[in-house]
Image (cartoon, grey):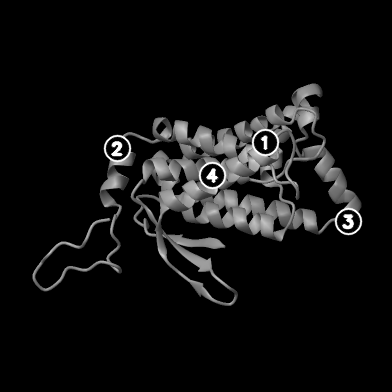
């Protein structure tokens, strides 16, 4: 198991207010739902979660659930995992795009992610919930905009043994995308076991990769790339003779 805990791309020009706001809204919506009764939770799911069959046949009201479902989660682990990834990678993407463009990018990736799952499973009746599709778009944008970014991770070997290597972002995120795509192929036509909408992740990621640079503000990508360290100082230091660190 590989768990990201921080990236090595901390220099920003602005406070990532939209990222903080998105995290806050997701958490508040989840807390509001868990305080209700099981019957009320079921009603909220039926009203605000996206159901593929309903999206195709129930008209504009059902289309709105592609937005509302992005702020609903099925449990603490579901919420925590999504918010962790958004916290680590969202701030830099927001800095490169600007606040309003980033918000539009996030919501658009989330909607297209839902539509991708609908297209793959048009007769599905299981509600789709979670910010995973939108965050998949953010992950793709991070790789496109910061190809030299590095991510501090915890790799669990055999519990309780673990290591905490610094990995290239493209390797970590690319590996995650490969798993989503492969798992999607294995469950083609429906949700996977456990209710995971892998094709929503794939759809959000692919759109994020395509729109990352068009949504980046003028000068944003060049500035951020110029200040991103390819070889972290805590791993490679100049020797007394001024020789350059090794490249890999």
Whether residue 16 is visible, yes or no, is no
* First-in-chain label (1 vs 3): 3
Task: Calculate the distance from the C-alpha at mark 4 to the C-alpha at mark 2.
Answer: 31 Å
Q: Where, quadrant-wise, is the C terminus in this rendering?
A: bottom left
> Which tag is nearer the camera, tag 1 or tag 4?
4
> Which tag is nearer the camera, tag 4 or tag 2?
4
| 47 on left or right of 8 | right
Task: Calculate the distance from the C-alpha at mark 3 to the C-alpha at mark 2.
Answer: 50 Å
> As displayed, is residue 176 above or below residue 204?
below
> As displayed, is residue 124 above or below residue 29?
above
Q: Position of residue 35 (x, y in %)?
A: 81, 59
Residue at mark 1: 67
Residue at mark 2: 219
Q: Secondary structure at mark 4?
A: helix
Kindly identify which numbered label has been placed on residue 178: 4
Q: Secondary structure at mark 3?
A: loop
| 245 on left or right of 44 | left
Residue at mark 3: 37
Q: Position of residue 81 (x, y in %)?
A: 61, 57
* First-in-chain label (1 vs 4): 1
Q: Nearer the viewer, residue 164 or 65?
A: 164
């Amino acid at each position: 198991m590989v768990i990201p805990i921080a990236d090595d791309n901390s220099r920003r020009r602005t406070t990532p207010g939209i990222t903080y706001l998105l995290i806050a809204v997701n958490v508040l919506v989840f807390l509001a739902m868990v305080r209700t009764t099981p019957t009320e939770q079921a009603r909220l799911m039926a009203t605000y979660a996206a159901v593929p069959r309903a999206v195709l046949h129930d008209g504009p009201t059902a289309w709105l659930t592609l937005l509302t479902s992005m702020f609903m989660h099925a449990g603490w682990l579901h919420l925590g995992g999504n918010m962790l990834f958004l916290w680590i990678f969202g701030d830099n993407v927001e800095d490169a795009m600007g606040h309003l463009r980033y918000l539009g990018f996030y919501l658009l990736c989330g909607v297209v992610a839902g539509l991708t799952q609908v297209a793959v499973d048009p007769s599905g009746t299981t509600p789709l919930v979670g910010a995973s599709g939108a965050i998949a778009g953010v992950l793709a944008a991070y790789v496109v905009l910061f190809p030299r970014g590095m991510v501090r991770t915890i790799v669990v070997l055999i519990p309780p043994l673990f290591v905490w290597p610094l990995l290239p972002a493209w390797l970590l995120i690319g590996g995650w995308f490969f798993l989503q795509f492969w798992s999607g192929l294995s469950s083609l036509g429906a949700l996977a076991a456990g209710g995971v909408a892998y094709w929503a992740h794939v759809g959000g990621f692919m759109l994020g990769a395509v729109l990352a640079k068009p949504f980046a503000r003028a000068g944003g990508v060049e500035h951020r790339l110029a200040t991103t360290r390819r070889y972290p100082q805590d791993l490679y230091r100049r020797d007394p003779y001024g020789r350059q660190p090794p490249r890999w």
